[in-house]
Image (spheres, helix red, strand yellow):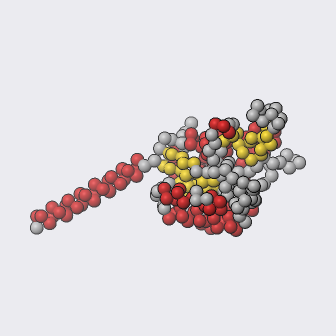
Amino acid sequence: MKTNKLITKTKALTILFFTFNLIINAQNKPTTIYLVGDSTMCLYDENRFPQMGWGMPFEYFFEKTVQIKNHAKGGRSSRSFIKENRWQPILDSLQAGDYVFIQFGHNDAQNSKDHPDRKTTPDQYKQYITKYINEARLKYAIPVLISPVTRWIFNSEGEALECHEPYLNALKEVSETLNIPMIDLDTKSRELLNKMGPECSRYLYMYFKPKEYFRFPKGNPDNTHFTGFGARKMAELVLQGIMEQELELANHIIKP
């Protein structure tokens, strides 16, 4: 009888010990954010300076308990990122509590010479975005949708133009249907451009006039990709969205 009680007590202590370890390990586990998207988010090496994706300065706004894994790749759409097997390795690595920031739509509207099979219709876009969400949820990760950032395009009255409306609307539908937090970087970035005006906001982008920057003596009319200044401003808008969505992640943003 005493032996049975001793065994029961030992089992209880063992369970308690492992439960305690699981709690401690969970508390010590870093918060991981996977960035999944296109060239406006991705990493660039020094040869492309001053070009940066907003995912590059993004990591410097967080405490050391947060690690950023930037898997974004230039030229990719919601479709081609999956077809090129870029999503599956991320999915295999996901752990419970990880965040997945998903930003596509910028390249979904058209194919290109280097990417002849990336185009999606808004309906197909919704299907692919839903796939990212559902598969991330199965791993108990936390998907967060981010709309494609605006291009530097203004009308004759000096107002920034909407560039991704069909995909922005599609993303909003997915967000509402599946109850997924969404950061509307499209609208936020246009508001920033309107606040700065056409001439000042040009410095957010890799848009250089002839002889303005030594790397581009003939100019570089790029109204899509960001300078380091632009990348930081876009990262700040994403941080603003994190706080507005009241994500737990907001608790890890470095406070000034």
- What residue appears at the point 66 percent right and 66 percent down from the top-left corner? 126
Q: Can residue 195 be seen in this view?
A: no
Q: Residue at x 22, y 61 (%)?
A: 11
Q: In which quarter of the image is residue 218?
A: top right
Determine whether, in the image, residue 236 is placed left or right of residue 195.
Answer: left
Where does the C terminus fall, quadrant-wise? top right
Q: Is residue 132 left or right of residue 149?
A: left
Q: Which residue is drawn at 62% across and 62% down?
A: 83
Q: Nearer the viewer, residue 150 or 239?
A: 150
Is the residue 38 above or below the residue 129 in the image? above
Query: x and y percent of residue 18 in the render?
Result: 30, 56
**Which corner quadrant of the image does residue 87 belong to?**
bottom right
Which one is nearer the viewer's eye here, 234 or 122? 122
Q: How far across and down, in percent of the image, does residue 168 sit? A: 71, 59
Q: In this view, does 186 lie above or below 197?
A: below
On the image, the x and y values in percent for residue 210 come to: 83, 35
Q: In which quarter of the image is the N terminus?
A: bottom left
Against 48, is 246 above or below?
below
View extreme (right): residue: 156
When the figure is inspected, residue 128 is found, relative to residue 252, above or below; the finding is: below
x, y percent for residue 97:
48, 56
Say if residue 93 shows up in the picture.
yes
Q: In this view, does 193 lie to the left or right of 76?
A: right
Q: In this view, does 145 lie to the left or right of 138?
A: right
Q: Residue visible at 57% across and 48% down?
A: 70
Q: How many numbered callouts?
A: 0
